[in-house]
Image (spheres, helix red, strand yellow):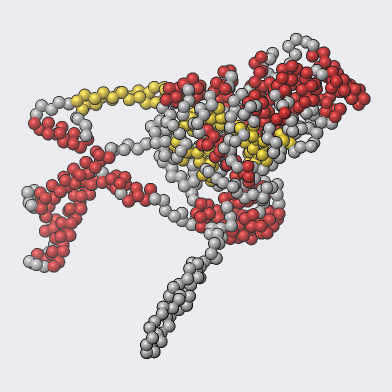
Amino acid sequence: MDGDGTRDARGTHANPVPRPAGPPEVPAKPPEAPAVPPRPARAPGAPDGSAFLTWLRTPRPQALPGVWRFGHRPRPEEEPERVPGRQLLSGAVIAFLVGWLIWSLLWNGYLGGWWLLPLYAMIPDSWAEPHSFTSVVVVYAYYVLIAGIIMVGVGRLGRWSEIWRRYGPPAWRRAVPGAVPAPAPEEDPAAWPALRAAGAHDAAERLAADARSGLMRDVDHARIARAWQGVQRGRHSLATFTGAVLSQGAGACPHPSGARDLPVRQARHDLVTGQVRIGTAADDARNPYAYRGAGLALGPDLLGTSLLAVGPAGSGKTGSLVRPLAESLCLHALAGRAAVVVVGAAGADLGPADAYDVVVRIGHPDSVYDLDLYGGTTDPDEAAVVLAEALVGDLTEQHQGGDTRRSTTVLAQLLGPFRAVHGRFPGVPELRQLLEGAPGPLAELREGLRAAGQDSLLRELDARERQLDRPGDLGGVLADRVALLDRPAFAPFFDTSGQSRPFSLKALDHPVRVRIDLPQRGHADASRMLARLVLAQFTASVSVREDRSLFACLVLDDASGVVTPEAVRGVQRLRSAGAGVVLTLRTLDDVPRPLRGPLLGAIGCRMALSGLTPWDGQDFAEVWGKEWTEARDVTDRQIIAETPAGKAVHMLRRVITGKAPTARAVTVRQVERERWSASELAHAVPAGHAVLSLTSVKGEHAPPLLVDLRG
């Protein structure tokens, strides 16, 4: 047979073996043809939907904030009293020996025959004949009953049931999860009961058939569920949705890119709950008992309050946090649930370029997309606000009033007239010349405004020219910052003439996946300025979106020099706008001292990774606050036995408990202590771990948890 690509040597394809000449032989009976194998359930290589159905039907119970809900088994809030294993086993053995002793005493008559009186009272005299089968059965059944009563009593004293639960088959069954049973049809998520309840039975049948045949993926399920939410909210018609499902099946309502999955995944994702697993809560006494051993995950419900992660280089910020979050948000974008912008240094591990719709490589000559310097706006005042924040937002403490209002005014005095004359905003070289007060460009603007009759804008330009000669004018500071972008490496970028393909954060109204690579090597100051620009444009764009059910998230792999007073105020507004930011820092020293408290207060999720400095740990300890704990002062005094019997009892206790007999005095009092002190954050967090506190958009809190990012 050719089923496996080989040939059977016993069949017709084998070469015959030469035989010596001799008398003719009776031909042997030809071998019977092998039985035809049963027809397979599906064609070879056809997809099987059992794995998808198992994933979809796995229970996801409601849990505490941050708990990985996929297959989660809730634990009690308080830790039950647990007897040490040695004490439990020794007590069980001693209880068994006591039961054996009692039975031996009864069997041998040392305690008398009183325990046989019920037997003699119940059986008739005719059963007492010697060698009667009935009498033998009844007597031995009575013996078994008495022995069982003794064993039940000593079993309760020796806690045999707890040993069975801790070390027996129940513990083995918990360790090896079984198959997920199929739910009832009206509760089976693979049968799409919501569609059936709305009357779309044909669409539900088509989706259920694709799920069983393996044509549906987790992204498809999430994307179609998102489209169905649009139908329920009235944004789409039921007929349009049903027609798309019947014609395309699991591929209905596709993402504009046409992609149905990422090229590669490194983290564990659950698109039913929207979570991505980042680690496991350590089995540590400082963690609440309900969290110990549970998986820790993040999702839009937590990222909506924003996240700040602080840790030195090599602590796992990019690999253990940023990369999984970027993957999760890209999957949500493919499902039509989110829009994501990931900003990092060129060469950072932020995922392959195929995982994004738009990749902006600033300073790279092969970059297909450009970055819009003005955020896609046509309002000169709005463009001036965002650009001033990017240029001098980190220098606001030197300005009168502590904000960027003066810089905004300077830029608005130039952007408005330039747009009125040229119909566009100035490019980087043109903006630099205007800020420096070059006479040629200013005279050209003046002539254009006079010809157009723009008297109000002409007054703005006159005011800018009068301020040029005043001491302390901000035009020179702004020009110096713009000069960082007026470099040969950036010459093809930030074009406003319409010859490039600029990306604007106004596109966050759609489920778009964007990655922006910053040229940190050789242009560190320019990279920090561009990161501030992206953050300012993001906070300005998401607050004016119409569809706030589409979660928008900005991930900044390195937020050094990005945190400004205006940035902190912008982060505070994101929660109500259905958006959030993820910021990572090597140290809080990269944030000005007056802004550390407001930043930690504006962020809902805070993560301190291993290797933190004590002064950084002090800021986290202050924001996490204190809690009331029960302090127990225990005093042990060894008991000295003076009699032989007492010494024997003490020796028995030492064998059972492994400790010398003591008299214990316990003093319990309530004290207020820090949840995590600065010293513990600096020295007690193991490598590959982090301390993470969480806040959901609904206001639910999770205390600081020690998380193993490698689990």
Kindly identify the residue that appears in the image at 37 percent across and 87 percent down: 22
Between residues 488 and 502, which one lies in front from this camera angle?
488
Taking the image as shown, residue 634 lies to the left or right of residue 672, namely left
Q: Position of residue 456 (x, y in %)?
A: 86, 21
Q: Position of residue 267 (x, y in %)?
A: 52, 43
Quick check: 689 above or below 473? below
Name the outermost residue toward the top. Answer: 471
Kindly identify the residue that appears in the image at 59 percent across and 47 percent down: 263
Is residue 62 visible to the viewer in this orientation of the structure?
no
Between residues 295 and 499, which one lies in front from this camera angle?
499
Between residues 301 and 108, which one lies in front from this camera angle?
301
Is residue 447 visible to the viewer in this orientation of the structure?
yes
In the figure, residue 81 lies in which quadrant? top left
Between residues 168 and 11, which one lies in front from this camera angle?
11
How many numbered circles are shown? 0
Taking the image as shown, residue 392 lies to the left or right of residue 14, namely right
Kindly identify the residue that appears in the image at 51 percent across and 57 percent down: 50
In the figure, residue 193 lies in which quadrant? bottom right
In the figure, residue 138 lies in which quadrant? bottom left
Taking the image as shown, residue 380 lies to the left or right of residue 121, namely right
Kindly identify the residue that appears in the image at 54 percent across and 62 percent down: 45
Quick check: 231 above or below 521? below
Q: Position of residue 640 (x, y in %)?
A: 15, 26
Q: Quadrant of the C terminus?
A: top left
Taking the image as shown, residue 373 lies to the left or right of residue 178, namely right
Quick check: 223 above or below 572? below
Q: Position of residue 145 (x, y in %)?
A: 19, 55
